[in-house]
């Protein structure tokens, strides 16, 4: 298929581009490189473009004529969204509407949308399944609920179908260390812990030790980015074969606390890096664990890397390779 991938130069998008490329699809990445990198695109071509720029979108759609769109481009940090909500509504809602307008103008009716566990807020039951109420507790999660609502309504109006994948916490890197998380300032727990082990930060903060969990720290369901990429391939096949709109959780169904992640990171790296316990970070729910029965049942998805040590090992291998590459370029 000819597939346009917004945000394909970013962390998750680049791993999905890798998986789609390996399957032989023809790819066009549309990315403004605000947090992504051109070197991360292992297959297909890049248009360096901004979602807010309808003319640039039109040119890309006219020239490439995609049959489907995978939409990763967004602003993604929970805590930043609490401080800068407008930025999140602008990029995740307004700019996504621009993309949907372009899809409509060019008659493209298949979409895979990157949603998130943050739509659930603080679920009253765990693991969370797709039928649970959406009560986001931060603007990032709200922006994704808003887009899910828009998608529901345009699919109901006809001639458009989509699959919204609600990712839980995505982690790890390409097994060959060609791509991985590469931000100027890391905020995700695993990357931040590994960069601390590597000496890039003096210590790792554990945000909150008074949550209602066994050790008082937040619990998340960490899914390896290549398992998530496989979920996209399967979801796209499902969408094209059945034409059915669906929403599916992506996670393993069990979680680890911040303290557990820190301890595995110390084991994998062999470095006893400094850790300090601090106040809670704004916008964090205590626990998020996926019920991904639906994804497994409808698409046949089976995780291959459900092992926190393996996830952190691939992230560590990537971290070492990426930082030495950065040093070599200096
Ligand atoms: N990382 C996670 O744990 C996680 C969890 C749940 C959902 N998600 C969702 O997955 C998607 C991808 O996240 P990621 O972790 O790969 O983030 P990322 O920042 O690495 O990737 C986002 C990409 O989109 C591009 N981009 C951003 N705004 C753009 C714009 N206006 N125009 C063009 N390009 C733009 C960036 O340059 C980047 O390449 C996002 O929609 C995010 O909300 C991520
Ligand atoms: O230096 C740090 C960084 C994080 N944490 C904690 O670790 C947990 C995980 O945080 P992080 O890795 O930043 O991920 P989340 O805030 O859970 O958000 C991620 O996972 C969500 C889905 O659950 C996605 O929607 C978001 O885009 C993605 O950033 C949270 O309890 C944080 O408070 C720390 O204690 N110290």
Image: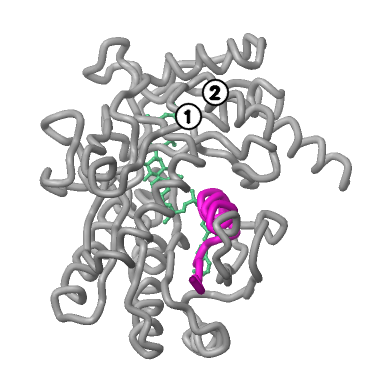
Q: Determine whether the residue tagged by mark 1 lies in a helix, strand or loop.
A: loop
x, y percent for residue 270:
66, 10
Q: Is residue 145 above or below residue 310?
A: below
Give, as a single range, the part of the protein colored magenta. Answer: 1-20
Res. 97 image quadrant: bottom left
Instruction: Left or right? Give the position of 99 relative to 173.
Output: left
Residue at x 62% of width, y 42% of height: 180
Q: Are marks 2 and 1 in contact (CB under 8 Å)?
A: yes
State the residue in front, 57 or 285.
57
State the residue in front, 295 or 217.
295
Was residue 288 drawn as part of the magenta stretch in this picture?
no
x, y percent for residue 253:
28, 29
Give the residue at mark 1: 305
Mark with earlier residue (2, 1): 1
Res. 212 image quadrant: top left
Residue at x 22% of width, y 70% of height: 150
For label 1, the crowd category at 10 Å Cα-Cα, with few meaning under 14, some 14 to 19 and many 20 or more, is: some
Res. 28 image quadrant: bottom right
Q: Find residue 242 and name its label.
A: none
x, y percent for residue 313:
60, 24
Quarter of the picture for ligand 2? Answer: top left
For label 2, the crowd category at 10 Å Cα-Cα, with few meaning under 14, some 14 to 19 and many 20 or more, is: some
Instruction: Left or right? Give the position of 45 relative to 83.
Output: right
Residue at x 46% of width, y 22% of height: 307
Ligand 1 within 8 angstroms of badge 1 C-beta:
no
In this picture the colour scheme is: one colour
Give the residue at mark 2: 310
Q: Determine whether the residue tagged by mark 2 lies in a helix, strand or loop.
A: helix
Instruction: Left or right? Give the position of 269 relative to 54.
Output: right
């Amino acid at each position: 298929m000819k597939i346009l991938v917004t945000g394909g130069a970013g962390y998750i998008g680049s791993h999905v581009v890798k998986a789609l490329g390996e399957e032989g699809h023809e790819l066009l990445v549309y990315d403004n490189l605000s947090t992504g990198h051109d070197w991360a695109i292992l297959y297909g071509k890049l248009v360096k473009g901004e979602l807010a720029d309808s003319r640039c979108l039109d040119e890309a759609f006219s020239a490439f004529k995609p049959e489907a769109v995978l939409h990763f481009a967004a602003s993604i940090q929970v805590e930043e969204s609490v401080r800068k909500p407008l930025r999140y509504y602008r990029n995740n809602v307004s700019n996504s509407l621009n993309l949907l307008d372009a899809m409509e103008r060019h008659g493209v009716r298949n979409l895979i949308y990157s949603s998130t566990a943050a739509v659930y807020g603080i679920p009253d039951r765990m693991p969370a399944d797709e039928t649970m109420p959406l009560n986001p507790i931060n603007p990032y999660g709200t922006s994704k609920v808003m887009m899910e609502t828009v998608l529901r309504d345009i699919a109901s109006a006809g001639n458009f179908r989509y699959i919204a994948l609600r990712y839980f916490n995505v982690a790890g890197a390409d097994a060959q260390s060609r791509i991985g998380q590469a931000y100027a300032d890391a905020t995700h727990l695993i990357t931040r812990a590994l960069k601390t082990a590597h000496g890039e930060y003096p210590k790792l903060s554990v945000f909150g030790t008074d949550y209602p969990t066994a050790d008082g720290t937040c619990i998340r369901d960490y899914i390896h980015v290549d398992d998530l990429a496989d979920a996209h391939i399967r979801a796209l096949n499902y969408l094209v074969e059945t034409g059915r709109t669906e929403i599916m959780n992506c996670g393993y169904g069990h979680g680890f606390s911040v303290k557990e992640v820190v301890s595995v990171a110390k084991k994998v790296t062999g470095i006893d890096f400094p850790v300090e316990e601090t106040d809670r970070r704004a916008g964090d729910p205590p626990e998020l664990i996926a019920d991904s029965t639906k994804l497994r049942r409808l698409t046949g998805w089976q995780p291959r890397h459900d092992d926190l040590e393996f996830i952190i090992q691939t992230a560590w291998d990537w971290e070492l390779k990426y930082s030495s590459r950065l040093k070599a370029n200096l």
